[in-house]
Amino acid sequence: MRVLIFLFLGCALLTAQPVEDTEVARAQMELNRVRALVEAGALARVQLQKAEDAVADAMDGSDIRKSIYLTDLTEEQAMRLVAAANRRFERRKTAFEQAKLQVDAGIAPANVLEELGAQLDYARKDRDLAATRADLARQATAMAEAESAAALQTSGAEHPPEASPVAERYDGNGVFTPEIFARIQTAFDLRFGKLLPVSANGETAVHRALGFDHRGRVDVALRPDQPEGIWLRDYLRAHRVPYFAFNQAVPGKATGAHIHLGPMSPRLVAANGSPHAAVSAGGSQ
Ligand SMILES: [Zn+2]
């Protein structure tokens, strides 16, 4: 019976492993090989720990590769990414420091540090990028939460939030299309010599999770009162483009301040189960 359970678990693990995780598979095979040699007394036990670390490292690497360049990262995915990147960095830092001790003691050649140093740099960059991505994901979540609260207020929900996160609402002519958005991006670039900081273009996993439809809308990570935000609001009013400006929702929390381009997002399904109509028909993406 026990054998059957193990067989079943083994099959489940095999099928759960994505094909692209060859690095993980390789490290796992190496671990099996080293374990057999250690048990046979042909290898020192310390090699087993190294092989186990290599498997953990490959698994973290696989997780990092899967999510570090996702444009649509949820806060939970971001936290997992940061944890994996931190583990990988600490593991490689330890490996480098241990190798350095051996090199300093003259029991290992100096050139082993080159490869380990490069791996450490790589892990450091991933760790920093992961932290940046997590920070952006937190901000995007705060922005979406501010919009969700505003959508509840305008939808006539039974218990709308008391304090409005909307600093300014401008309905313009009610139309926002990808072409209009492209013109805004160009104008911003010409004025400030940098890209418009877009935090959400269309629907995202966070918006979906909060229950509203962000298709055809764009969030710009600018505070309404900073110079770029003031310029953008002036531009939008001059061109009659609808927008909502949001102040920081909760003082001390990740900032939800931003400018939402387009009409307010309709809720996908209201609390009572019936879909609410869109506030206005804007462009679609
Ligand atoms: Zn928005």
Image (cartoon, helix red, strand yellow):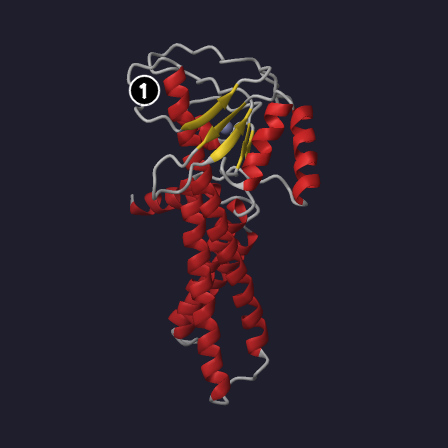
* Above or below: residue 177 compared with residue 142: above
**Quarter-of-image position of residue 94:** bottom left
Any atom of ligand 1 within 8 Å of the CB at mark 1?
A: no
Q: Give the position of the C terminus as an image quadrant.
A: top right
Quadrant where the N terminus is found in the figure: top left
- Is residue 1 toward the left or the right of residue 225 in the image? left
Q: Position of residue 231 (x, y in %)?
A: 59, 35
Is 124 situated left or right of 10 in this image?
right
Mark 1 residue type: Pro
To which quarter of the image does residue 252 belong? top left
- Image point 58% across, 15% down: which residue? 174
The secondary structure type at the circle numbered 1 is: loop
| Front-lying residue, 137 or 255 | 255
Depicted 269 relative to depicted 35: above or below = above
Name the residue nearer the viewer: 138 or 174: 174
- Give the x, y percent position of residue 216: 58, 23
User: Residue shown at 48%/78% (left/top)?
Assistant: 99
> How many numbered circles are shown?
1
- Residue 131 seen from this side: yes
Is residue 36 in sight in this rendering? no
Q: What residue lies at 52% left-to-right and 38% top-to-bottom?
A: 222
> x, y percentage for residue 183?
69, 29
Task: Find the residue positioned furthest to the bottom.
Answer: 106
Q: Nearer the viewer, residue 198 or 110?
A: 198
At which x and y percent is residue 277?
Answer: 47, 10
Front position in the image: 43 or 261: 261
Q: Residues within 10 Å of mark 1 (few under 14, many from 20)?
A: some
Residue position for label 1: 160
Residue drawn at 29 percent across, 14 percent down: 158
Position of 231 relative to 178 (above/below): below
